[in-house]
Amino acid sequence: MKFIAKCDYTLGIKKPVMKPEVSQNGVTSYRVEVPAVRAVFEQRTLSHAEIESARAQILNNGGPYAFGSIPGRDEGNINVQDAMQEGYTSTAHQGYDVYQNLKTFDTADPRQCRPEDREEVEQFMLNHYDLGNMFVRVDDYALTPPWPTYPVDGPVNVEALLNFAKAGGLVDVVLTFEAAASQREEVLDAFEVASKELAAQREEEAGLTARV
């Protein structure tokens, strides 16, 4: 399971098991026999679909400020928990880039969660009171290729791929698929540029229509 938090966030799930040891001169010390179990949210690559899913879940679901925003006073940021208690909002941070502030924890990633702890960690997180407020679950996306003959693996003719996607109105679909599946940098770079250009074009056309 993959979870996304709105900021740096750590859940303490189980304390470490400490074993006492007595030295020859009678001094007792403790060593970690079983490590603590924690869910530490870190910066990792997220697909566009995962980001949008997280934002959609949190914007109207608990918490006094928008998902991904940093609460704060005029003179600077304040602690997240203090902000929640004091009722601060994200009004001063409307221009904050939500995409740069999302952190993730994936129970399927052995670097983040020991396989032997996975079931316990998932149950804890699914039943934790901060689920839906400080963090949300984002299901794995079993994405299908944008079209049946889409080249999933190996090198591609990026220009031909882009022209075909533009003709079919599938630029954002390809971008989502590549970000979540193939992650070929040359394809991602080209389609990110094309997606922004098309968005700007749509915005300009909407403005012209509104003025008429």
Image (cartoon, helix red, strand yellow):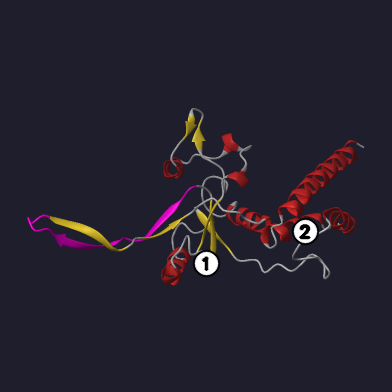
Q: Is residue 171 left or right of residue 76?
A: right
Tell me the amino acid under the disc marked 2.
Val
The residue singled out by tag 1 in the image is 108
> Which image quarter: residue 100?
top right
Query: Is label 1 in a helix, a strand or a loop?
Result: loop
Residue 117 percent location from the top left of the image: 41, 69
Q: Is residue 90 above or below residue 135?
A: above
The magenta stretch spans which residues? Answer: 8-27
Residue 174 percent location from the top left of the image: 77, 59
In this rendered view, identify the residue nearer to me: 209 or 159.
159
In this rendered view, identify the residue nearer to me: 23 or 130.
23
The residue singled out by tag 2 in the image is 174
Say which residue appears at 42% left-offset and 41% top-offset: 82
Residue 27 percent location from the top left of the image: 11, 55
Residue 165 colored in magenta in the image: no
Q: Which is nearer the N-term, disc 1 or disc 2?
A: 1
Taking the image as drawn, is residue 133 in sight? no
Q: Is residue 138 left or right of residue 30?
A: right
State the quadrant of the C terminus: top right
Query: Is label 2 in a helix, a strand or a loop?
Result: helix
